[in-house]
DNA sequence: TTTTAATAGGAGTATATACACCTATATATT
DNA sequence: AATATATAGGTGTATATACTCCTATTAAAA
């Protein structure tokens, strides 16, 4: 049980989750004025790029459980930032960004940039780039099985 | 709005949260047989090393909101894995690992090692080490303000 | 063509997370 | 000592997350 101390420094899960809480705080602080959570901002961005897109496809890209995505999308739909309607294949549901959603994103972008710059300056551009690459690797690693 | 695509690759918040979901899945998969979530495992570990420890102190170390910690601790207390009792300073509440909690940790450790090894092999020991260091840097960066 | 498989998605439930607002206790100020 | 302030902690509420089990629809097999 003497390992416990090391694990606090070496456990990938612990460290990544802790970092997620920490970095989320930075971004949500700046996004609060427009009432967007970190996940919501990411979802709107993804929808902007991929939409119209099905729930399953979006969940794959976000590495998010399909049912988690459903709940998250419902909130955005209620606020009129996206639309969700049945696709040609009537099993599928297509998610699309609305004009209102686009407007919110336009307001969000400079705020996002504030947070991103703070992280960039804090870590250094080089190091941040490296970090993001390594995280991508970790993500695809987890996808494999 | 053409920036949207890049942001998917460069947003630190998005990437770290996504990685957290991905890596959590790996660890929770192996921990499921003993009924521990990733956060619960980390909390037990932290309590093992730091306990008896106050809620505020534990929250600082975990970079977790105090109230979040309260809810998480309640679950562990209900299961008899920790005890929470009023300290000398009667505002404080001291968290301590129980014998039962220690036993669960003993069972959890080899399972945790499975997951950790999978990540270590996937990324390479060197790269993982680097990644964890960079995440530590990001965490302390977020702590500063 | 009927039956069976696979796929897309939702609802129930439980945990994780944090903000706003509250109480209790200890410390500092006067 | 009485009051004010700071600190520790909890509750209400809302979002985030994912597992299990369910239905609907499409595609495949017989």
Image: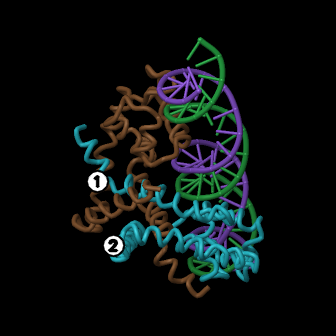
Chain colours: A brown, B cyan, C green, D purple
Image-based side of A68 in relation to A62, left or right: right
Judging depth in this view, the residue of B55 and A89 nearest the camera is: A89
Q: Label 1: chain?
A: B
The residue under the point 59% across, 74% down is B58
Determine which of the numbered discs, if any, sits on residue B127 in the image: 2
* Figure quadrant of residue A49: top left
**Residue B29: x and y, percent?**
58, 60
Determine which of the numbered discs, if any, sits on residue B42 in the image: none
**Residue A115: x and y, percent?**
33, 55
Query: Visible in this render: residue A26?
Result: no
Q: Is residue A56 above or below residue A3?
A: above
On the rendered image, what quadrant is the N terminus of chain A found in?
Answer: bottom right
Judging depth in this view, the residue of C19 and C4 nearest the camera is: C4
* Figure quadrant of residue B38: bottom right
The residue under the point 67% across, 75% down is B107
**Residue A119: x and y, percent?**
31, 62
Judging depth in this view, the residue of C12 and B112 nearest the camera is: B112
What is the number of callouts on the image? 2
């Amino acid at each position: 049980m003497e390992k416990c101390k090391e694990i606090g420094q070496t456990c990938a899960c612990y460290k990544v989750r802790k970092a997620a809480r920490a970095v989320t705080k930075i971004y949500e602080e700046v996004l609060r004025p427009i009432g967007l959570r970190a996940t919501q901002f990411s979802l709107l961005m993804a929808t902007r790029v991929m939409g119209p897109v099905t729930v399953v496809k979006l969940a794959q890209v976000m590495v998010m459980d399909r049912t988690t995505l459903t709940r998250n999308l419902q909130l955005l739909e209620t606020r009129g930032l996206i639309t969700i309607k049945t696709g040609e294949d009537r099993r599928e549901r297509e998610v699309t960004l609305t004009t209102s959603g686009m407007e919110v994103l336009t307001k969000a972008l400079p705020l996002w940039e504030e947070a991103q710059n703070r992280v960039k300056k804090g870590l250094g551009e080089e190091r941040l780039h490296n970090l993001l690459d390594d995280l991508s690797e970790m993500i695809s690693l987890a996808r494999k099985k």
